[in-house]
């Protein structure tokens, strides 16, 4: 009996992004039972990829993305229809933001049904109710005449609120929408009137674990780390300024900003490190593209993980640090509250307050973003600095909670249940 085929779409499996890491984990979770293929949006060739999680190796096929000529940003608009025709998958599972999947309805439906939530050139949008009503009748007739065999699961983050109401028109085409957190589940329910399940991201708890791997030169230091991308949503400059406020009278503290200090979407961080006088309290970042073993080793050197985020759909860096026994200081917005406090044992970190809110541009995400209170974040750093026992206790809580709720062995069971339910419906 042949296996059912699942096609997943997202950042390439070997990529350094959170979406890439999560896509790899979901592929691994399903590859023990299904024929798993991935359209890696940054992939240049078709290849077999061996994924290892929780000490077990599984193979998936990753397909190249082939954008149209001169197309700078492509989310599979050309490659996805070709792969759908070639593979005829039983399940299409997309792992990405709303603006990156708005072409999918036109793949799943006839060309006469056009669903586009965001018109970037004019920066206009269609009201969500109007869009939903417009396509509802067409969709019903289409499904009756051409009942499609491929089921679409849209695994989508919500990293701020309120969402744009017209997004519901895209979500309504999917056979199943899955949130990435309880917070995201609440956004779907409260703003879009959609009852959806949620499945957390996972972490390899056999690879990411506490390690005693500090060199002698770091033995007496208190290390604060930030493992994110240098981009506006992650607020790296506010992280630097918060640390500078906290560290101004201390010789035994270090900041490790593990990111590209000159990312094209971010800031020249070396300038700000010098501007705020902490250049002698910095651990230089490792080059991009390091192994997952090296990523885990970096977390394990830290005392505290910093997430001064403006909003998270989940927070993979938070649970990777948790798995290594590192508590987190997280902006008190979106998923931080549940990751640090929900479930036993808790707490697993400290929440830094929000100074102000601002609206993101329509072509980015069009949700409210939070500006972390730098004074409060510095206060949280001081709290952990003054109380090593508190750091240790929160770190132990973090490790235990992650093993219980976010180990890939646990998350894989949730995905298997989801796929089985969809296939049997």
Image (tube, rainbow, N blue to C red):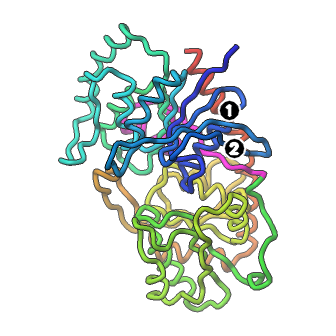
Q: Is residue 252 visible?
A: yes
User: What is the span of residues highlighted in magenta in the rendered image?
Assistant: 178-206
In the image, residue 61 sits, relative to residue 424, either above or below, namely below
Across and down, in percent, residue 410 comes to 71, 39
Q: CA distance from mark 2 to mark 1?
A: 9 Å
Q: Residues within 10 Å of mark 1 (few under 14, many from 20)?
A: some
Residue 16 lies in what quarter of the image? Answer: bottom right
Q: Classify 66 as above or below 419.
A: below
Q: Is residue 6 left or right of residue 157?
A: right
Q: Nearer the viewer, residue 266 or 354?
A: 266
Q: Magenta stretch: residue 4 in it? A: no
Q: Residue at x 33, y 45 (%)?
A: 69
Is 90 on the left-hand or right-hand side of 110? Answer: right
Q: Nearer the viewer, residue 183 or 96?
A: 96
Where residue 115 appears, x then y in whole percent? 29, 31
Residue 51: assigned label: 2
Q: Nearer the viewer, residue 73 or 134?
A: 73
Screen quadrant of the C terminus: top right
Q: Secondary structure at mark 1?
A: loop
Q: Earlier in the sequence, mark 2 or mark 1?
A: 1
Q: Which residue is mark 1?
A: 31
Q: Residue at x 44, y 45 (%)?
A: 158
Secondary structure category for the residue under label 2: strand
Residue drawn at point x = 35 percent, y = 35 percent: 103
Residue 25 or residue 393, whichever sits in front: 25
- Using the image, determine if residue 277 lies above or below residue 138: below
Q: Is residue 199 magenta?
A: yes
- Is residue 179 visible in this depiction of the protein? no
């Amino acid at each position: 009996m042949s296996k059912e085929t699942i096609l997943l779409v997202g950042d390439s499996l070997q990529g350094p992004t959170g979406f890439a890491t999560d896509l790899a984990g979901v592929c691994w979770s399903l590859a023990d039972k299904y024929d798993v293929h991935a359209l890696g949006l940054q992939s240049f060739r078709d290849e077999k990829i061996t994924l290892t999680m929780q000490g077990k190796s599984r193979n998936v096929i990753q397909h190249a993305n082939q954008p149209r000529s001169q197309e700078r940003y492509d989310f599979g608009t050309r490659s996805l229809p070709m792969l759908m025709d070639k593979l005829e998958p039983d399940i299409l599972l997309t792992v990405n933001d709303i603006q990156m999947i708005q072409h999918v309805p036109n793949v799943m439906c006839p060309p006469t049904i056009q669903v586009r939530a965001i018109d970037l050139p004019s920066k206009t949008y269609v009201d969500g109710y109007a869009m939903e009503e417009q396509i509802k009748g067409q969709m019903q007739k289409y499904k009756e005449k051409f009942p499609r065999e491929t089921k679409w699961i849209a695994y989508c983050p919500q990293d701020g609120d309120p969402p744009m109401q017209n997004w519901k028109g895209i979500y309504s085409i999917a056979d199943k929408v899955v949130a990435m957190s309880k917070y995201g589940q609440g956004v779907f329910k409260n703003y879009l009137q959609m009852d959806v399940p949620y499945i957390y991201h996972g972490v390899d708890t056999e690879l990411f674990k506490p390690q005693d791997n500090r060199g002698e030169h770091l033995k007496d230091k208190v290390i604060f780390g930030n493992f994110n991308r240098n981009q506006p949503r992650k607020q790296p400059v506010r992280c630097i300024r918060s640390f500078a406020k906290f560290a101004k009278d201390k010789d035994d503290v270090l900041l490790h900003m593990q990111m590209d200090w000159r990312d094209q979407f971010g800031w020249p961080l070396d300038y700000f490190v010098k501007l705020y006088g902490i250049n002698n309290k910095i651990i230089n970042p490792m080059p991009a593209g390091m192994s997952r073993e090296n990523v885990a080793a970096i977390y394990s050197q830290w005392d505290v993980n910093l997430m001064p985020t403006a909003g998270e759909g989940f927070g993979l860096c938070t649970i990777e640090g948790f798995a290594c026994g590192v508590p987190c200081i997280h902006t008190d917005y979106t998923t931080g509250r549940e990751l640090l406090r929900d479930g036993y044992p808790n707490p697993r970190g400290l929440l830094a307050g929000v100074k102000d809110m601002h609206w993101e541009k329509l072509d980015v995400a069009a949700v409210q973003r939070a500006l972390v209170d730098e004074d409060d974040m510095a206060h949280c750093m001081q709290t952990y600095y003054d109380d090593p026992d508190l750091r240790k206790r929160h770190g132990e809580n973090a490790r235990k909670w992650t093993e219980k709720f976010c180990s890939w062995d646990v998350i894989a069971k949730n995905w298997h249940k989801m796929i089985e339910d969809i296939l049997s419906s």
